[in-house]
Image (cartoon, grey):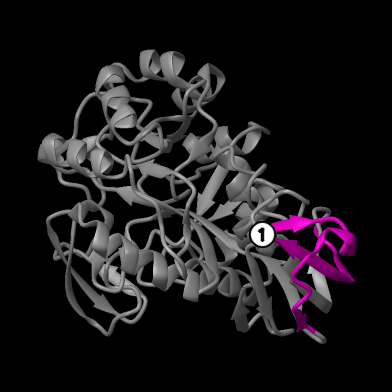
Amino acid sequence: MIIKNGLVFQEDKTFAKRDLYIEDGKIVGSLEEVKDRTEVDAEGLYVLPGLVDVHSHGAVGCDFSDGDLEGLKKILTYERSCGVTSYCPTSMTINTDELRGIFKAMGDFTEGPGMAHVAGINMEGPFLDVEKKGAHLAEYILAPDVEFFRECNQASGNKIRLVTLAPNVEGAFAFIRELHDEVSISLGHTGADYETAKAALEAGANHVTHLCNAMLPLEHRKPGLIGAASEDEGCYAELISDGIHIHESMVRAVFRMFPGRVVLISDSMRATGLEDGTYDLGGQQVTVNGKLATLASGTIAGSATNLYDCMRTAVSFGIPREEAIAAATMNPAKSIGVYDEVGSFTPGKRADVVLADRDLKLVKVL
């Protein structure tokens, strides 16, 4: 396939009018390498790498923690239709036997045609701080457990790419030191202060789970995890730019504080893609009204939007278009160690392509 005349997003975060060559599902570097010369005219359109969502629980009535692979296929089909071509199904804090089950089910899972590619698994619970549990159930929260993590990861076929950890709980630092070379460790759902967070990053953590949410706020005398992570140039920070979780001024501030390190995520739950109503998230009832999803207590519980819409919302907040695109493609791929496979149009990578108009409205997913 040849995608002609489009404005192709480059690894230096610029656009170049050029043709894009695809053969056997991979990007190739020249016309000579293309056997199937079917042409797609992208005149006047942006040609973007498929988006990479590293933190999403579900959509269209399904949730990864259901342990239902047919449900996961529905999620992956929906995500691809929204321009998200690489996806990390994300677990909640649930019963340990159920966790083992959903990870084991992923051991032999392969997505089918028309679905987003599973780039890995995000293990958001259960190693959290009860005081900052958010929508996670306190009764299933555990102290960090290296052996339990390895059991789950092995059962999944070593597909866990990201695990959330509260660095202020007992056993956290031993966990980080033991596992930081095996998985990206994300700090989150934590009341950690600046000093604790800084030490955890120095020990090997390299990621932050939904920055600003379920953690201490950034204060001038108590900068907390946000301040510590902003100073670590190797740390990526997730951000839910849905217009609900984070004020637009803070979205702009985060992009300034984490240059080239913002990872836009959806943190979507099963109500995404459906009408307003009451749904389940990790065993708790969630009420959805527009983009807002809340527990009975009023606590925000995930989002009801997809990553593509979060990217467009970030642009509407004043984030430069190129930076928002990078934060939904390149940065997340780098943050979980799959940038050699997805996230840009380097020859040899998956040919995941999104066509969009000048307002970033989705036109086609190829």
- Image check: 219 left or right of 296? right
- Mark 1: give few (<14), some (14-19) or many (20+) Cα within 10 Å: few
Q: Is residue 14 magenta?
A: yes
The correct choice, above or below, for 263 with respect to 165 in the image is below
Quarter-wise, where is residue 299 in the image?
Answer: bottom left
- Image check: 355 left or right of 251? right
Indicate the position of residue 339 as horizontal and vertical percent values. Answer: 65, 44
Q: Is residue 307 magenta?
A: no
Q: Nearer the viewer, residue 252 or 347?
A: 347
Residue range of the region highlighted in magenta in the rendering: 13-42
> Which residue position is annotated with label 1?
24
Q: Is residue 56 visible?
A: yes
Indicate the position of residue 355 as horizontal and vertical percent values. Answer: 68, 78
Q: Nearer the viewer, residue 291 or 331?
A: 331
Give the residue drawn at x 33%, y 43%. 108
Give the residue drawn at x 25%, y 44%. 105
The correct choice, above or below, for 276 with respect to 111 in the image is below
Indicate the position of residue 366 as horizontal and vertical percent values. Answer: 62, 73
Q: Is residue 301 visible?
A: no
Quarter-wise, where is residue 29 in the image?
Answer: bottom right
- Image check: 51 left or right of 24? left
The correct choice, above or below, for 14 with respect to 272 in the image is above
Q: Nearer the viewer, residue 344 or 334?
A: 344
Amino acid identity at mark 1: Asp
Q: How many marks?
A: 1
Q: Secondary structure at mark 1?
A: loop
Indicate the position of residue 249 as horizontal and vertical percent values. Answer: 59, 65
Q: Which quarter of the figure is the N terminus placed in?
A: bottom right
Quarter-wise, where is residue 188 in the image?
Answer: top left
Give the residue drawn at x 71%, y 55%. 344
